[in-house]
Image (cartoon, rainbow, N blue to C red):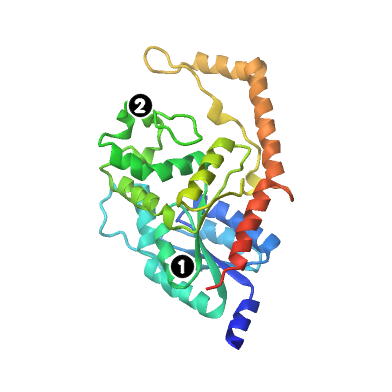
Amino acid sequence: MEHIHTQQQKPSHVAIMPSPGMGHLIPLVELAKQLVLHHHFLVTFIIPTDGSPMKAQKSVLEALPNSISYILLPPVSFDDLPQDVKAETLIALTVTRSLPALRDSFKVLAESTRVVALVGDLFGLDAFDVAKEFGALSYLFFPTTAMSLSLFFYLPELDERFTCEYRDLPEPVKLPGCVPIRGIDLIDPIQDRKNDAYKRILHNAKRYTSADGIMVNSFIDLEPNAFKALMEVAREGKPPVYAIGPLIQPSLDRGVDGSDKLRVEVNDNGLVGHKDIANYVRGLIDGEEGKLLRNKMNELKDAAGKALSQEGSSTKSLAEVTQIWKSHKK
């Protein structure tokens, strides 16, 4: 009884396992800062490696508050892989081949601290088995949009329904709460279904339902219909979804530039001429379309700031998650 009481008095500890690469690490670092500074957790990053230089990642990790520590797992070997293997396969294999080392590190943490949750990202779903083994909750951090998350939820069904490549689908893909999207516009890693990269992405997508919850690095006002649909499917057996973003590195926060809104018409040869580009940019700068676009970007920037304010929707969503973690009993 005394041991249980002691365990409950220890600060709640969260382990975070990012997929390899700085792009995966940065948003999770911002999440860790929130957990430490505003919710009083201890955080340990457990980082799979493949032998690539880690100087940049180490400089980021070593600049973090003392309540955030990190463990670099031993590098995995890719000597058995062909030269033309895709990046998605390498990332996925770095995680799966690091699972024994992750288990050893997690065991040490669990024996010395009160580990309540493991947070993984897109390629880290197999790590959730380790968390469950030690009685910790498993949460997926989804680094992009609610619409992208909807696609991953739908991918196993898409895989079963169609045998063709997705670029050849006769009709647009209809995701709940999202605008229809042409098969050719789906993300590149799922466009070659025979490639091992696709199979590994599909494998992880099938495991999304094993998460205890999913945190999305977006905010409700940006994608209200998509989030509404995701919250409805959560009542149908899928994990609850929490909009907690946008969590971005402060020095990189220059607002939304709207570059994904720029569309220049191609000519009869399928090319875009430099004069067309110049005219279009001039129109964006001086014309009504540019004014509307700038206004929309400013609105979104204000909405993002509001979501992250003390009473904002994303702040409240993260607080809800942390409360679940703190009250978790193994």
Q: Is residue 302 left or right of residue 201?
A: right
Closer to the N terminus: mark 1 or mark 2?
1
Q: Is residue 253 left or right of residue 119?
A: right
Disc 2 is placed on an element classified as loop
Q: Nearer the viewer, residue 77 or 323?
A: 323
**Residue drawn at x 66%, y 16% as measured from the top left:** 286
Q: Nearer the viewer, residue 117 or 122?
A: 117
Judging by the rendered image, the residue that carries numbered circle 1 is: 131
Q: Is residue 81 above or below residue 42?
A: above
Tell me the quadrant of the picture where the N terminus can be found: bottom right
Can residue 28 be seen at all in this image of the molecule? yes
Q: Is residue 143 above or below residue 19?
A: above
Q: Is residue 184 left or right of residue 321?
A: left
**Residue drawn at x 42%, y 44% as measured from the top left:** 152
Q: Are marks 1 and 2 in contact (CB under 8 Å)?
A: no
Q: Return the mark for residue 171.
A: 2
Percent x, y of residue 136:
50, 69
**Residue drawn at x 49%, y 77% as measured from the top left:** 108
Percent x, y of residue 182:
40, 28
**How many C-alpha atoms fall within 10 Å of the one at disc 2: few (<14), some, or many (≥20)?**
few
Q: Residue furthest top?
A: 268
Viewer-side label of 1, 2: 2
Residue type at tag 2: Glu
Q: Nearer the viewer, residue 58 or 330?
A: 330
Residue type at tag 1: Ala
Disc 1 is placed on an element classified as helix
**How many C-alpha atoms fall within 10 Å of the one at disc 1: few (<14), some, or many (≥20)?**
many
Q: Return the mark for residue 325.
A: none
Can residue 123 be seen at all in this image of the molecule? no
Q: Determine the CA span between mark 1 and mark 2.
A: 40 Å
